[in-house]
Amino acid sequence: MAILPTQLARVSNSLRNNVATQTLARTQQSLLEVQNQLATGKQISTPSDDPGAAAIIQQLRKTLEQRQAYSANLQQATDHLSEVDSTLGDLTDLLRQASSIASANVGSDVTPGERQAAATIVQALYNQVLSLGNKQYQGAYLFAGDRSTEAPFIEEAGGIRFAGSDRALANSYDQSTVLPFMVNGAELFGAVSARVQGGVDLAPALTGSTRVADLAGARNSGVNLGPIQLGNGSVAATVDLTGADRVDDILDRINAAGVGGIVASMNSAGGITLSGAAGDNITVREIGGGTTAGDLGILRPVGTGAGAPLAGASAKPRVTELTPLSALNGGAGFDAASGMVITNGQSRATVRFNAAITVGDAINAINGADLGVRAEINAAGTGVNIVNTTEGASMTIAENGGTTATNLGVRSFGPNTPLAELNAAKGVRTVAAADLRIVRSDASSFEVDIDGLNTVQDVINAINAASGGAGITASFATAGNAILLTDTAGGVASPKVLAVNFSEAARDLGLYGPAVGTLVTGADVNAVRADGIFSHLAALRNALQTGDAKTITEASEGLDDDVARITRVRGQTGARVQEFESRQSRIEDQNLATKSLLSNLEDVDYTAAISKFQTLQTTLQASLQSAGTMMRLSLMDFLG
Amino acid sequence: MSLIGALNVGRTALATHQAALQVTGNNIANAGNADYARQTSQMQPISGRQIKPGVFLGGGVDLTAVQRQVDEALAGRLRASVSDQSGAATAEQWLGRVEAVFNELGDQDLSTQMSAFFNAWSDLANRPQDASLRQVVMQSGSTLAKWFRDVRSDLGHLQIDADTQLQSLTANADRLAQRVADLNQQIVVAEGGTGGMANGLRDQRDTALKQLSELIDIKTVADGGLTNVYVGSEPLVIGVTSRGVALKQETVNGALTSTVVFKSNNGAIKLTGGSLGALNQVRSEDLGGVIDQVDSFAHSLIFELNKVHSSGQGAEGFTGATSTNALNDATAALTDPSAGMKFSPVNGSFVVHVKDKQTGLVSSTLVQVDLDGRNGNDTSLSDLATSMNSISGLSAQVSAGKLTISAAGNNVEFGFSQDSSGVLAGLGVNTYFSGADARDIDLNSALRDHPMLLAAAKNGQPADNQTALAIAAMQTTAMGSLQGRTLNESYQSVIDSLAGKTSAAKSDAEASRVVLETLQAQRESLSGVSLDEEAVNMIKQQRAFQGAARLVAAVDELMKQVLQLV
């Protein structure tokens, strides 16, 4: 509204017209605004109406839109896990049935015919469990992890092979929460519980093309690249390592800095060595709170001394599929030529790595042998695991005359195997007194006490000690997995191993077979076996067919373990469903609060708007009336 | 002392009041003319004769001037205010149009599309194996890209509209400046040094000046009958010559720029107000700025999303791939400007996986992308093709600036992962979006043809969802290329700054309108015609005329009497 000076000397007609038109125009504009607000119900129609409020409105809307996604994810997770829960319920019922069939058929009063009938029922149960294991939900196999496009449980000659993945998918449920919404099928069915864990740290050496991202870092917290300060006692330079992708890049930049005669190279420990000219007293410091030098293992704030090289600690390169086999074991490589013998159930193959260049190639060689085993790099990136994916089949990994399996850390049974792990972790059963007697070919004998020994090598040492170096030498096979007893007594009889004091140790160590010539070859007593629901059901079915009461009982016990495990997983699933549901209801509560806030900001206050509308109407009417009256008045009317 | 003298007095009175009545009539006639300045008649008694020592008789009345009632200082302020108001109104109108393009706070806007897009990825993470969700992700990406293009093209059209408007306003300003110069000349000729005022011509010049001030913020300096016009400190009209106003349009870096210049020497006119100044400012800075922001936002979205996507794997591998972005020079290092990369890769590497479909075995090879600017061996597109060509099972070559990779044999497929260099995203291999900014952003056509190539996985498993998860999280992840802001925040800041500017323009327009109306009221108070006043004047002049006529009649009577004496 124009500010009119009150002391206007005269009021011309155009002034009066202008004031009237401006007033009317403005009132009508305001009326239009209020009318628009009333019609749309919105207080703000474009951001410029109120930029501050508009920014908050957009933020709140964005939050609501994001929560839509989180809410959908929660719904999906709840649905998925509910489906899992009901499947687990069905599974438990089936296994309980199997278990009760087992207990009903143990006794001697059951006829073979009845057992055969029971076996048929167990077979039917087996088929039902298999179909539950391969259950699909929304086009995805429930228990296949991130391989849910294909059925996870495949029937093969040796049993059931798990073709799924044990990595469960996760999704985000708010900005900072990522939770898995699947269950691990492999663990649930006991399908791949058995694996040969890479026993040794393969400790690959650095190579020029090792990626910085693949370094675990000297302090196991990765490598955060930034600038470091490199000095030689007299000059210091900042070397910016930001953006270096490979070890070569790091070496290159340090060398290019040209501090004294300092040259960087890779050392066999997996670290970086800085060596200088005669007078260089090498120092490496962090800059600005960085951790680069420490992560690379070359932090040395106090000089190494004139001319002394700085041998950095290992930057701990991880084993990746790209790691060259030659870099393994600190650059010593491994015995690629001999190969190793993998047996799984009825399958057996000698895997050789002559053509393999990288760890990925080696893994392909193992996986490509079609043995129902899967090789993979362990989660820590320190070694290779070989997983037996075929339920009910036993897997062994042995040397083929060389050190391949040992080098890779995957020999399933070796001198370093703890006794407690043998025989599917049942260990070696010993008695307080001597456990076994070894009879030489000349019929002389000695006794060995296994008690208190830890590893297979300890047993070998104990035998050799007891033998006193005469007549019998114990050793571990270089081809195959067995304890060997070599007889040099020169007698005519075959050497043999006898159990004494009712000890089971000889059997548990695999030393029960007859000698061949002068050599007693033990059995591999550390076969890796994936025992789970399917193998237990299969064992029960077979035992019912043959009437093997002991196996029936064992299978029944196994099934009880399975039921316990499923119940535990089901409990966890239930807890997770509950968590998802409570998150869902929290989101709904939050949405309600957000929406009411949003409404406060953007929705029109009808009472205020309507009363404003009425006031403006009155104003308009008054303006029209006064303008009409005033404009009609003219002195001209009075001129005669 | 004579009767003739008295008759003469009557004659002057008759003539003067007749003229005054005409002035009043003219005022009444122009009562509805907004640019008219009311005129008043200036009268003066005619000095008489001394009939005897010490006694003077008046000689009647004379019209000395017809005066325009104007205040030049007020007129100057009014013109400045007209400039301000018309500039602010233009800015308000144009910024409002820019704001309307985004239609934020509406139910359908770009930010809603972005949410829908990222939500689709989030949903894909729930069921990565689901082909229909892949379609949803592609559809929403396609829609988002179309929104970007539409917004960008609407902004482009606004710019073209603004250019057209600028041209017409410039032509108008030029015409008005010329008119002021012409009127200057006519006024000087008409007034001819008489000291009088050619009121009608001056009114016309004032009108021209007012119209000119709506376009350009002018200053005027009166020089006798002439009015000189200045823009800032530069003269536009000096005396009877106008320097002229023109629009110079040039293409700089592929974008059309417009500058308002003097016709006489092509020198830029420094405009700060008026609708021409405001429009010029909106076009080049506000509209241009918003277009740049939208383009750079789209650029970042494309590159950042493609970086994540190009390190992921689809439900199926590639049997062949061709980069979407052609390079100008395949032998130049990728960071060299002559290579023509639209996105800047960095020193890094990526892994190529070659899968034998029969055995299911995957062999992986590291491809180095050396871009550290050292040793003169930085990677070029050809180098990249050479190193990929050496991978068993693949062949790669460059043709027409594009990298083509193909699998050798029917049983081989390939994929990519762990690209730390951004080179795949930069070249357009295994990418989600094609294009480089808001003008040409689109869903990569390779994906449209083969939806299974959409990368949801990161570890190569067919039903993995880690890439989908990472992309869904992108909208709330701070990014270096967006100065540490998230995509949401970055877009929000475009809208917020536009809203702030538009809102400021609105209140500027409102404030300057109040000032203008106030000044106009003052002007109308002084120069406007009041019919009542004119009616009073008319009666006054009528009566005066009647009186004078009576005087003549009386003198005539007297003269008759005198003549009868003869």
Image: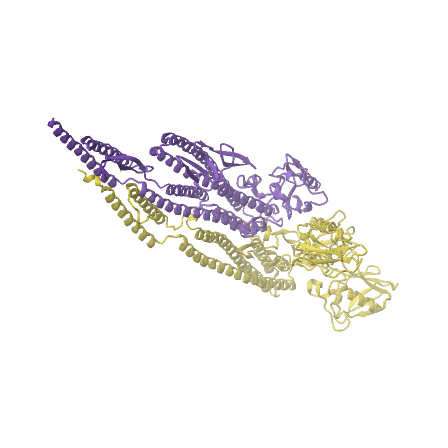
Chain colours: A yellow, B purple
In the image, residue B220 above or below residue A575: above
User: Left or right: where does residue A275 sit relative to residue A10?
Assistant: right
Dividing the picture into quadrants, the one containing residue A565 is bottom right
User: In the image shown, does B377 or B447 lie closer to the viewer?
Assistant: B377
How far across and how far down the image is residue A257, in percent? 73, 51
Residue B29 visible within the image: no
How far across and how far down the image is residue B100, in percent? 44, 43
User: In the image shown, does B229 or B102 lie closer to the viewer?
Assistant: B229
How far across and how far down the image is residue B432, in percent? 57, 43
State how many labels appear.
0
In the image, residue B21 above or below residue A78: above
Image quadrant where one finds the C terminus of chain A: top left
How far across and how far down the image is residue B529, in percent? 29, 39
User: In the image shown, does B58 or B112 lie closer to the viewer?
Assistant: B58
Dividing the picture into quadrants, the one containing residue A386 is bottom right
Residue farthest to the right? A490
Residue B437 visible within the image: yes
User: In the image shown, does A371 or A72 lie closer to the viewer?
Assistant: A72
User: Left or right: where does residue B364 sit relative to residue A620?
Assistant: right
Residue farthest to the front? B53
Residue farthest to the bottom? A432
